[in-house]
């Protein structure tokens, strides 16, 4: 149980507690106060008290001081828990999902980001990873006024994977909604025409966008076509290889899609069976072969830490993905949230094994000519690691960079779609979310269109 004399710190401190196995069962008390430009914290864990004082910034405004108060309270708690448990985590006291955002903030303030990251106990190899990501984003990152991405949600899958916490359900159970859902997407996309400025990227995501039939996919891409008049990047997250057909690839080519995703997750048949995939590794290879004549850029996903997968099996999956030579390979760390079937039955992986998986992927991808170009973290990630997208030179996915760095508007349609509108040069972001449940979304689509229009036509 955690107590603190500053109630606004409790959510931030709980993010740190969740990083340490068993810490939620410990009695923890945090006393936080400011003394001039110093932030002083006393942390008591299981009867042992540790005191920490950290210097702030001269003449910091109230909002900035509040941010610093959170930072140093979290750091103090991390130090205390690390001291008690003997555990040093790969990202130290950083709990945010975008480490690069903090790095950019430091650079914009005229300071190198490395000293702050080192103070927060971030591992040296992760500091180097951030440095490489920032370098890869030069020339890609764009903060221009009016830039916008378009996201279209197709939350249908052949089956639900055991680790999945998204709203998707087997298409056999949701197909009855599909005609009305496609019509609703058409209404939303038709109403979006006057809301989008400079369209940088279109992303059709899931679910598994290849789960519907080719004609149904064409209906979605046809509705997108009037919005994509500048030939911008166009991604269809095709998804699971057992949904690939030549007809669906033809539809993508017909409507100018430039990139597709083949979500392998693993090349171990045993692992695929354990996580509820109804296909084999050979199906992944077949999907690559089927897509080869179409000249799409291909993104491929792998997951480190899948239940029961050995270090050797994961390394073999990395090697096989590299051999297939997709433009992008994203290495995710297993993240189990509420709603994932594996959450309650999966024990946390041994940190050593998972760290070896991550280290191998970084070394192998670097040797094969890939560079890390975006990264993000999530709560409940095994080993408190991260997800990293790797790209061959000149093939980075703009949509991934835009979404992770939140540098432009994002107009999102469909169930569980979250639109974002930037104000004050990106310093303020307002969001608009659609219902997760498909029937509720269908009932509210007219209201959602009006709400989104108000958001995107609003002035500063």
Image (cartoon, helix red, strand yellow):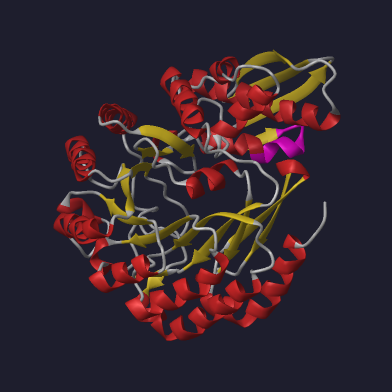
> Residue 227 versus residue 112: which sits nearer the camera?
227
The image shows residue 42 at horizontal and vertical percentages of 69, 20
Quick check: 389 above or below 171?
A: above
Give the quarter of the figure containing the N terminus: top right
Q: Along the horizontal axis of the image, is 422 left or right of 355?
A: right
> Residue 456 versus residue 347: which sits nearer the camera?
456
The image shows residue 103 at horizontal and vertical percentages of 59, 27
Q: Along the horizontal axis of the image, is 292 left or right of 459?
A: left
Question: Which image quadrant for residue 406?
Answer: top right
Q: Along the horizontal axis of the image, is 61 left or right of 451?
A: right
- Magenta stretch: dominant secondary structure: helix
> Residue 333 versus residue 350: which sits nearer the camera?
333
> Residue 62 versus residue 33: which sits nearer the camera?
62
Question: Which image quadrant for residue 79?
Answer: top right
Span highlighted in magenta in the image: 4-11
Of all residues, the one furthest to the front in this rendering is 230
Q: Which residue is drawn at 46% across and 23% down?
A: 85
Number of numbered discs present?
A: 0
Q: Residue 336 in magenta?
A: no
Q: Is residue 192 visible?
A: yes
Q: Which residue is drawn at 53% across and 63% down?
A: 228
The image shows residue 429 at horizontal and vertical percentages of 71, 49
The image shows residue 410 at horizontal and vertical percentages of 61, 56
Q: Residue at x 65, y 74 (%)?
A: 191
Q: Can residue 89 be seen in this view?
A: no
């Amino acid at each position: 149980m955690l107590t603190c004399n500053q109630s606004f710190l409790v959510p931030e401190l709980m993010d740190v507690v969740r990083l340490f196995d068993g810490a939620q069962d410990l009695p923890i008390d945090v006393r936080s106060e400011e003394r001039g430009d110093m932030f002083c914290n006393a942390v008591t864990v299981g009867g042992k008290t540790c005191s920490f004082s950290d210097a702030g910034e001269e003449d910091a405004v109230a909002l900035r001081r509040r941010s610093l108060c959170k930072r140093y309270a979290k750091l103090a708690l991390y130090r205390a828990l690390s001291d008690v448990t003997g555990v040093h985590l790969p990202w130290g006291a950083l709990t945010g999902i975008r480490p690069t955002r903090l790095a950019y903030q430091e650079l914009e303030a005229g300071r190198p980001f490395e000293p702050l990251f080192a103070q927060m106990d971030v591992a040296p190899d992760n500091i180097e990873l951030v440095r490489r990501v920032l370098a890869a984003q030069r020339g890609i990152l764009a903060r221009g006024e009016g830039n916008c991405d378009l996201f279209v949600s197709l939350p249908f899958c052949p089956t639900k994977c055991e680790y999945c916490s998204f709203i998707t359900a087997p298409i056999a159970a949701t197909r009855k909604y599909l005609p009305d859902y496609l019509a609703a997407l058409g209404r939303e996309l038709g109403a979006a025409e006057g809301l989008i400025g400079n369209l940088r990227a279109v992303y059709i995501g899931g679910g598994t966008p290849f789960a519907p039939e080719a004609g149904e996919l064409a209906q979605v891409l046809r509705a997108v076509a009037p919005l994509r008049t500048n030939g911008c990047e166009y991604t269809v997250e095709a998804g699971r290889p057992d949904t690939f057909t030549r007809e669906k690839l033809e539809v993508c080519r017909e409507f100018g899609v430039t990139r597709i995703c083949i979500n392998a997750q693993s090349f171990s048949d045993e692992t695929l069976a354990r996580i509820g995939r109804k296909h084999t590794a050979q199906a992944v290879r077949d999907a690559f072969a089927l897509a080869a004549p179409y000249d799409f850029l291909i993104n491929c996903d792998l997951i480190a830490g899948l239940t029961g997968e050995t270090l050797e099996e994961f390394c073999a999956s990395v090697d096989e993905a590299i051999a297939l030579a997709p433009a992008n390979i994203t290495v995710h760390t297993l993240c189990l949230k509420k709603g994932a079937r594996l959450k309650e039955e999966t024990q946390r992986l041994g940190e050593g094994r998972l760290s070896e998986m991550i280290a191998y992927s970084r070394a192998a991808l670097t040797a094969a000519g890939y560079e890390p170009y975006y990264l993000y973290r999530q709560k409940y990630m095994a080993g408190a690691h991260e997800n990293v997208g790797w790209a061959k030179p000149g093939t980075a996915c703009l949509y991934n960079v835009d979404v992770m760095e939140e540098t432009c508007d994002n107009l999102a349609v469909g169930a569980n779609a979250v639109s974002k509108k930037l104000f004050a040069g990106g310093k303020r972001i307002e969001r608009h979310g659609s219902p997760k449940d498909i029937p509720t979304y269908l009932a509210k689509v007219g209201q959602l269109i009006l709400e989104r229009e108000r958001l995107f036509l609003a002035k500063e």
